[in-house]
């Protein structure tokens, strides 16, 4: 089976998730700048979540360039990833509306952790289907950034109950880690 339907469906889901995310931003009824102040926590969580979704979309896009064919396991692994990403608007809104309170911050981290695990599973399924000598296998190597992210999310979830600002700092740090363009897949594709 070709990857085209998987790619088209995934792109559509990413677009819907981002649309739902922006709908969480409520328009103030006052025309002054001070009316925006109460919306700042919601806006900050929106920015962070938008960045995470953009990172996932970019990496998913690059990863699918290495795929020649898909099987049922890859399709289900992809749906698993999309499920966790689809929860980001809910946890974003909950965390923003509650001004980064401990429980919403921890749940936000749990969704990010599960999305990272799901992405790792999808990657492993693609590598398994295409072989250990595939372009993706060579590109990801030991996937140090992925492992750092998972450990960071686990720490952030625990720290949310100590001081949620530590968790938020970890979420931002992980986003910044992935915001730096990852050229591994592009480099391997150029070599082939």
Image (cartoon, rainbow, N blue to C red):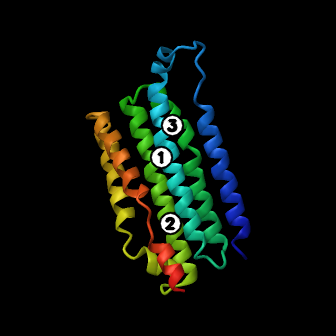
Q: Residue at x 57, y 82 (%)?
A: 130
- Compared to residue 68, the image places residue 97 above or below, namely above
Judge left or right: residue 78 versus residue 113: right
Q: Residue furthest front?
A: 32
Q: Which residue is at 50% across, 72% downward?
A: 124
Mark 3 or mark 2, which has the lower sequence index?
Answer: 3
Position of residue 152 measured from the top left corner of the image (x, y, whole percent): 32, 52
Horizontal side of residue 54 vs 37, given as left or right: right
- Rendered-image quadrant of the N terminus: bottom right
Work out how far the residue at label 1 is from the one at label 3, CA to CA, in angstroms. 15 Å
What numbered label is drawn on residue 111? 1
- Residue that badge 3 annotates: 46
Q: For the residues carrying marks 1 and 3, which lies nearer the camera in this image?
A: 3
Determine the secondary structure under disc 3.
helix
Mark-to-mark CA distance, 3 and 2:
26 Å
> Which residue corresponds to mark 2?
121
User: At which x and y percent is residue 82?
Assistant: 60, 54
Residue beneath the point at 49% across and 73% down: 185
Q: Residues within 10 Å of mark 1 (few under 14, many from 20)?
A: some
Q: Residue at x 61, y 76 (%)?
A: 67
Packing grade of label 3 (10 A; few <14, some 14-19, many >=20) is: many
Crowdedness near tag 2: few (<14), some (14–19) or many (≥20) residues, C-alpha within 10 Å: some
């Amino acid at each position: 089976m070709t990857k085209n339907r998987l790619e088209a469906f995934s792109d559509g889901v990413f677009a819907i998730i981002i649309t739902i995310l922006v709908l969480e931003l409520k328009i103030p009824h006052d025309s002054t700048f001070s009316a925006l102040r109460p919306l700042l926590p919601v806006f900050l969580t929106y920015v962070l979540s938008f960045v995470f979704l953009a990172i996932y979309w970019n990496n998913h896009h690059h990863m699918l360039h290495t795929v020649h064919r898909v099987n049922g396991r890859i399709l289900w692994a992809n749906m698993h990833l999309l499920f966790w990403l689809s929860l980001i608007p809910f946890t974003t809104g909950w965390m923003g509306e509650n001004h980064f309170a401990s429980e919403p911050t921890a749940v936000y981290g749990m969704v990010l952790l599960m999305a990272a695990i799901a992405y790792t599973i999808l990657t492993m399924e693609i590598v398994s289907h295409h072989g250990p000598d595939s372009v993706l296998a060579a590109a990801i190597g030991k996937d140090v950034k992925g492992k750092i992210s998972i450990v960071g999310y686990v720490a952030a979830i625990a720290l949310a109950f100590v001081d949620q600002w530590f968790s938020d700092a970890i979420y931002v740090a992980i986003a910044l880690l992935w915001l730096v363009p990852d050229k591994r897949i592009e480099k391997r594709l150029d070599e082939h």
